[in-house]
Amino acid sequence: MRFFRVLPVLGLFFLLMAAPTPAATADCQHKGELDELYCDEDRNMIADTPLDSKQWKNPNTLVFTYTPVEKPEIYKEALADFMRYLSRATGKKVIYYTADSMSIQVEAMRSGRLHIASFATGSTCFAVNLAGYVPVAAKGDKNEIQGYRLLVLVKKDSPYKTLTDLKGKKVAHTSPSSNSGHLAPLALFPAEGIIPGKDYEIAFSGRHDQSIIGLGQGEYDAACVASEVFARMSTGERIDGGKYRIIWQSSVFPSSSIGYVYNLKPELAEKITQAILEYRFSPEMRNLFKRTDRFLPISYEKDYRAVREISKASGESYDKATLDKMERAEQLARERKGKKDRSDE
């Protein structure tokens, strides 16, 4: 069953069910940038666990999802061993559902239908502010957390050498909510002499994979993508990396995060946290997530500071109005791609 598809209809019901009582809201002295449903008394920028034990959730079945990707069945299969580990550690049944977009993923956690999740870099900040998401860790190895860079790719035989060469061209961005695929270019490119959407046409592809493939097929003149996706596709033989060329790259950003929803029973949240940090990747996960073999603890306040600053510099906020705007843009991009795919059949 794909319950995520009915979330727009049921969203109001679940939000009303999840909302704190007026007394609990009135007692909160500090929210920071969090939505009105949450409180941040310890000022660590993430939602506090409710003080009232009646608000704690202790479901018999835990719902887990990975950040939206082009081929979710590959990730579901690779993450099966991790889900079994979570099940043994918590004593709960753990099931996997596929979220079709970042906004659906955020809404699923906000409404109480999603308990554990991995959110992409930019989506992490929306989930923290709007869904009560508590980031615990990020992929890494024994030495450090995995990071990635924003890459600007062109075809190897193209004439483009610098960002300013892309003026008047068509450049693939992934989606309005993506850090490396959209927000970072908006914030960083003007200093390089080019303004996205003004100096070149932005074409939303939907995902990093689709941007890279579309560039290779000649749909775009360039593509803004995450370095880890380009590396994974190249080593996984989905593309010939030698047919692409990098003309610009950013400094390092943190990778996707993994964590849980704020109002789980504390003992359950602790078991989930411990399981995430103790788990060592299966061969399938090591093959999928190159150069990583574990989850390492993170500080949202510290490790995602650069991401929040990128969003601020691009004029965006991690609030409901921005999420709704991005969802409309993402939906339009999906509809356009659907029409194109049908016309190619």
Image (cartoon, rainbow, N blue to C red):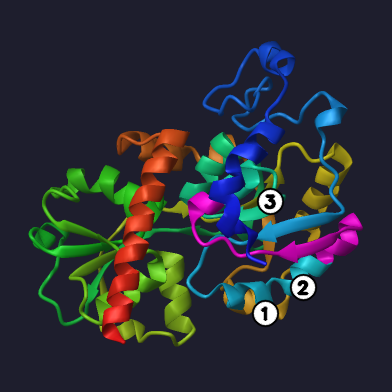
Residue 181 in view, yes or no: no
Which residue does the numbered mark 3 point to in the structure image? 114
* Picture disc at residue 45: none
Q: CA distance from mark 3 to mark 2?
A: 19 Å
Counting residues from the N terminus, which is met first, the one under dot 3 or under dot 2? 2
Residue type at mark 2? Asp
Q: Pick the quarter of the image with the N terminus.
A: bottom right
Q: Which residues are magenta?
A: 85-104
Q: Residue furthest front?
A: 9
* Mark closest to the chain's N terminus, 3 or 1: 3
Question: In which image quadrant can residue 129 be found?
Answer: top right
1 and 2 marks in contact (CB < 8 Å): yes
Three-letter residue code for mark 1: Glu
Cα distance between the residues tagged 3 and 1: 24 Å
| Circle number at residue 284 | 1
Q: Residue 115 at x, y = what percent?
A: 72, 50
Q: Which residue is mark 2?
A: 81
Mark 1 lies on a secondary structure that is: helix
